[in-house]
Amino acid sequence: MERKILKNKPLVEAIFEVRWELQGPMPGMKIDPHYKILIGRIYDRVKDEYPFHTQLSTIALPDEIAAYAVQHQFRKDKGKWPLIQIGPGIITLNDTEGYSWEDFEKRMREMVAILFEAYPDAENNLKINRLLLRYIDAINFNYEEENIFSFLRDNFKVKIDIYEKLFEETGVSDLPLGFDLRFSFPATKPKGAVHLRFVRGKKKEEDALIWETQVQSVGDSLPQGKDQIVDWGVEAHKLTDSWFFKMIEGELLRRFE
């Protein structure tokens, strides 16, 4: 369970993603031979909860280059969240401001169960090759008046020092026009990697600091059963939740409460 219920949570989007192996003669030209029938089978099973179907522009991509591009969305209603997305070799669960882990976990379990039920002969044909849990958060920030590196140090415990003499007598301001900081660290529970990113972006058309926390696993050691995949999601959430609250502990946490 989450440690706190944040009334002013900074969440932009939560994403749980499952990918599986495709078939084909060469990289970049792989297809899912069961994809066309899978779309209908998925819709039959989600239409009560997510009745609003939208085809994305990626539907126009030829099958040979559409690998892992989401093409269909199933929503509760037009423009409403949460939603399920599907494309060749990929299915995702997405939520935004209304997110709570308890609800997200329930929907994650349902989505994984539906995938295994709908995929033709899933036991033999469905080989999972990537799992991802991704959280995108944002907070408004005035880059012209505040120093982003001081803000990261004081509020996220992330220390980035740019050599100050680079800016002395050079006519260059030490307030960056843009930045994109990325870090990746190996993880053991679940086995994979944690990715942390800080980038300048927009939140509702205003300048903002965007930060992402991701847990990703790839390769042969991935869980293949539906229950084990859900267990992976639960462990990944424990990890992202721990990182989130450790980073914002202090003034930011008080702002979000």
Image (cartoon, rainbow, N blue to C red):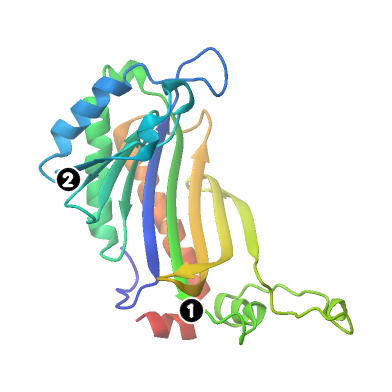
Residue shown at 42% from the left, 35% from the top = 69
Q: Is residue 257 above or below residue 196?
A: below
Looking at the rendered image, the quarter that the C terminus falls into is bottom left
Q: Which mark is residue 60?
A: none
Question: Which callout, 1 or 2, points at the residue further toward the start of the chain?
Answer: 2
Q: Which residue is mark 2?
A: 50
Q: Amino acid at mark 1?
A: Glu
Q: Secondary structure at mark 2?
A: loop
Give the percent coordinates (x, y) of residue 206: 46, 75
Q: Which residue is mark 1?
A: 249
Residue type at mark 2?
Tyr
Residue depicted at x 37% and y 47%: 16
**Most extreme residue toward the top, as rendered?**
25
- In the shown orientation, is residue 7 left or right of residue 66? left
Does residue 117 appear in this view?
A: no
Foreground mark, 1 or 2, reads 2
Q: Nearer the viewer, residue 6 or 173?
A: 173
The secondary structure type at the circle numbered 1 is loop
Q: Residue at x 69, y 79 (%)?
A: 175
- Residue 85 locus on image (x, y percent): 31, 41
Quarter residue 2 falls in: bottom left
